[in-house]
Image (spheres, rainbow, N blue to C red):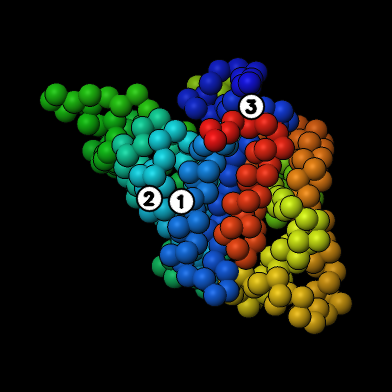
Amino acid sequence: MTVEQSGGGDGDGIRAPRHGEAPTPLSVLDLVTVGAGRTATDALRTSVALAKLAESRGYHRHWVAEHHSMPGVASSSPAVILAHLAAHTTRIRLGSGGVMLPNHAPLVIAEQFGTLEALAPGRVDLGLGRAPGTDGATAAALRRTERLNEGADDFPQQLAELTRFLDDDFPDGHPYARIHAVPGPVQATSPGGVQSPHRPPIWLLGSSGFSARLAGTLGLPFAFAHHFSARNTIPALDLYRESFRPSAVLDAPYALIGVSALATDDEKEARRQVMAAALNMVRLRTGRPGLVPTPQEAEAHRFTEMERDFIESWNSNVVHGTVDQVRTGLDDLAKRTGADELMLTANAHSGDVRLRSYELIADAYGLPNPA
């Protein structure tokens, strides 16, 4: 059974159908993680397998996030990965969760996502963030500037420029009025040109109130990073809803949240897996990023008191355990936050463990099963 979300228009593919007994539509956030003893090729093959699984089981979107200079995350080029996933899927929406706009010229992003839209018409999302997705030194190398705050502070202007490139509607007299993002609307004005009916919808991503307020003011959909900023989730969603102004895109707010969720066949195994992922976060937060360790390595690690405090806090926001425990946790989270969509990210050393988690959750909610 499929139940359409209520509350306003479709928003050009923004609003999602809810399948089975899930409390909201379910989607996938893929961090393309690389485990110890594995290669980036292994991680990308898992991403293809995950996209196929998600499509067959009724997950609505598959997003990948931009990260840099992190050995355990092979998603430095979201557009490249999304093009590959588009070639292996036919229905699922594909998108960025997100592209870190200050790292790029808006025209480049308009061209990349115009190309993706041409490859996968009507199923591409453009999620945008204003953080660098890395450390300060790497951000400086990406942006060719030491003034890193300038990029974040200029985010609304960069967003406006990107939107005009996507719509090809700079006003007469603007320095960019004769510049066109291709593929894009300009092709319809050429002799024999045909206008594509689709344009990637823009989502704003955030882990605090800035993007929440901006998304609301502009009437855009909003995605909040609950998976690493849980204490800010409800305040940010409240701010988004309070700030929302109807737009040509949406007539009512639409917010999804990213959720760390890992279901296994055994509760003890779930704890082993999330401890390994948490050890990876400890290393990242202390300036020692690396490959995702194995559960065995995490079990042998001698955690300091400070590390244990961090891990306890971190894992308290990871919905993990048996599939019944995960279902209960997701149901509760959906109720507490009022999120319109849950986007699940399964962090584990093994690709097989991640794939199994999405299967178990799909089974628990009675999502479509072509088998």
Amino acid type at mark 2: His
Q: Residue at x 67, y 31 (%)?
A: 366
Mark closest to the chain's N terminus, 2 or 3: 3
Amino acid type at mark 1: Val
Local crowd size for mark 1, using a 10 Å CA cut-off: few (<14), some (14–19), many (≥20): many
Mark closest to the chain's N terminus, 2 or 1: 1
Q: Residue at x 51, y 38 (%)?
A: 55
Q: Is residue 46 visible?
A: yes
Is 120 above or below relative to 353? above
Amino acid type at mark 3: Arg
Q: Which mark is residue 84?
A: 2
Where is residue 309? Give x, y as percent: 85, 69
Residue position for label 1 = 48
Q: CA distance from mark 1 to mark 3?
A: 23 Å
Q: Nearer the viewer, residue 197 or 370?
A: 370
Is 216 above or below relative to 51? above
Residue position for label 3 = 18
Q: CA distance from mark 2 to mark 3?
A: 26 Å
